Amino acid sequence: MNFIVDWLGTTAFTLIGNTVSWVEVIGFVTGAACVWGVARQKIWNWPVGIANNIAFVILFLGAGLYGETVLQLIFAAIAVYGWIKWSRGASGTTGSNDLPIRDASRTEAFGAVAAVMLGTAAVAWLLHAGTDSQVPIPDAFVLAASLVATYAQAKKIFAHWYVWIAIDLVSVPLYFSRGLALTGILYIGFLALCIYGLVGWNRLRATSKPVPELAGV
């Protein structure tokens, strides 16, 4: 096991003056595949996403991005929920994958905004007070917003794409500033894939039977 961990940390190549480890390469490949799978509504995006989470735990811990490290562990847990939710679909039958795309209710929208704001403030304070993090605020925002986006993704709430786009816009300069050039480039790709997913889901939503908001949920 130690041999594998040591190998993952070795240099695969150099990019823009920054060394790129094998674990960052694995994170790049699995991350891109996962987002493409979400955009295409493929159930396999969830197990691929879990593999991506494991790779990023190793990567972010080494880069001192502690909020991001914790985030990946929580992502993995939510991915299990999303995998089950998508598999059962609207009918509750395993393997159906017929969960409809829908809009967030007013309660869900306000709750999401509040969760991101309060989560960012709380995590930033914890990172500032308890770690040597050099970027507590953007690190905290990415953590809080990503949890909200992943939960909404599991519910197939359309607006989760807008949250991911905001996360990508913050993440790109964050990762470049920490010397993670390949991951920064990956998040530029994520941004493009999120726009692709947003357009695709919007097209599907427009051509399928409207799904009303779940008022008060």
Image: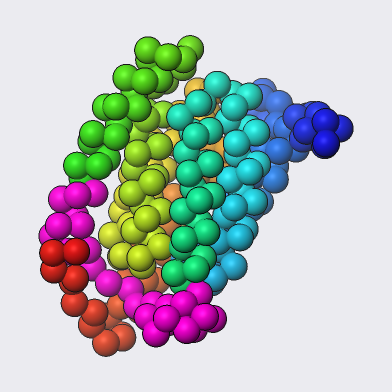
Verify whether residue 27 appears in magenta: no
Q: Nearer the viewer, residue 4 or 198?
A: 4
Q: Residue at x 23, y 36 (%)?
A: 117
| Quadrant, the N terminus | top right
List x then y, in percent, for residue 217.
19, 64
Which image quadrant is residue 143 in?
top left
Most extreme residue toward the right is 3
Q: Is residue 42 above or below residue 65?
A: below
Residue 43 relative to residue 149: left or right: right
Q: Nearer the viewer, residue 118 or 77?
A: 77
Q: Residue at x 23, y 68 (%)?
A: 103
Q: Residue at x 13, y 60 (%)?
A: 106
Report the coloring of the rendering.
rainbow
Q: Residue at x 60, y 39 (%)?
A: 56
Q: Can residue 169 be seen? A: no
Main secondary structure along the magenta-highlighted residues: loop
Magenta residues, as a range?
87-112
Q: Is residue 139 above or below residue 35?
A: above
Q: Can residue 117 be seen? A: yes
Q: Is residue 160 above or below residue 158?
A: above
List x then y, in percent, for residue 28.
63, 46
